[in-house]
Image (spheres, rainbow, N blue to C red):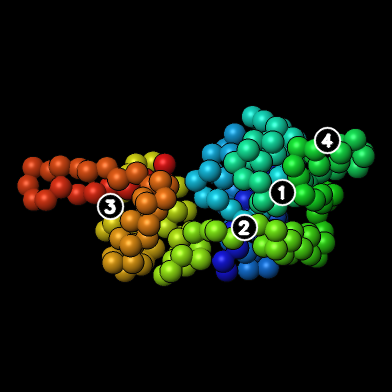
Amino acid sequence: MGTTILVVDDNESIRFTLKEICHFAEWNVIEAASGKEAITIFNKMKPDLLLLDYHIPNGDGITTTKAIRKLNQHVPIIILTVDERQEIADSFMEAGATDFALKPIKAPDLISRIRLNLKVSKLTEDHHSAFVDKGIKQDTLMSIKNHLLNQEDAITIDQLKEALPIAYQTVHRYLNYLESKGEVEVMIQYGKKGRPKNRYRLV
């Protein structure tokens, strides 16, 4: 359950279908409905692979691919499109895409493409990642980050602990880790009584 896929498509039913396919293969899924949202979420969540629709609002597939490549040179980007023209494929490859899947999506084909791209990525990427650090598990880290991503306001460790649920000490250790990586901002809230409370939010 360690792999996380970012699904980017403005069609909610297609996102649902892709999510179901990924869940069948036991991958975690996060979603975006536009290019701009995809870049924001990619920055926060750092997924292992992107499924990116060609025609999306607020930055089309090519623009979004180029923007992601500026942030990460290795993450696999699989383009989803109904357009079979070679010039479209060439444009995406020049922008930094790693593979294509034609719509309508066929689950076995997509799963095999994702597995192959993940395997190649692990072979080629310099694996100096957060997930090899001692005591840090990817699924726990992604659970905490995903919950923080869905909060409008900064929240406390107690709120995180109750929502997930994960032990207080574990949540505290992971938040400290994310803070050290510059991925979480700590905000101190002073009350009328008692000690000030730390609140956390994704940067």
Look at mark 3 in the image and give the residue it sits on: 156
Q: Is residue 85 above or below residue 166?
A: above
Residue 35 appears in the figure: no
Q: Marks 3/4: CA distance?
A: 45 Å
Mark 1 or mark 2: whose residue is earlier in sequence: 1
- Asked whether the residues under the numbered discs 4 and 1 touch, taking CB atoms below 8 Å apart as contact, a structural biologist would say no
Q: Nearer the viewer, mark 2 or mark 3?
A: 2
Q: Marks 1/2: CA distance?
A: 17 Å
Mark 3 or mark 4: whose residue is earlier in sequence: 4
Disc 4, SS: helix
Q: Write down the quadrant of residue 166 in the picture.
A: bottom left
Q: Is residue 143 above or below residue 80?
A: below
Q: Nearer the viewer, mark 3 or mark 4?
A: 4
Q: In the image, 136: left or right of 18?
A: left
Q: Write down the quadrant of residue 136 in the picture.
A: bottom left
Q: Position of residue 173 (x, y in %)?
A: 33, 62
Look at mark 1 in the image and give the residue it sits on: 77
Q: Position of residue 100 (x, y in %)?
A: 81, 49
Q: Marks 4/1: CA distance?
A: 14 Å
Residue 144 appears in the figure: yes
Residue at left offset 40%, top offset 53%: 178
Residue at left offset 42%, top offset 57%: 144
Look at mark 4 in the image and give the residue it sits on: 91
The quadrant of the rendering that contains the C terminus is top left
Q: Which dot marks residue 126?
A: 2
Amino acid type at mark 2:
Asp
**Residue placed furthest toward the top:** 58
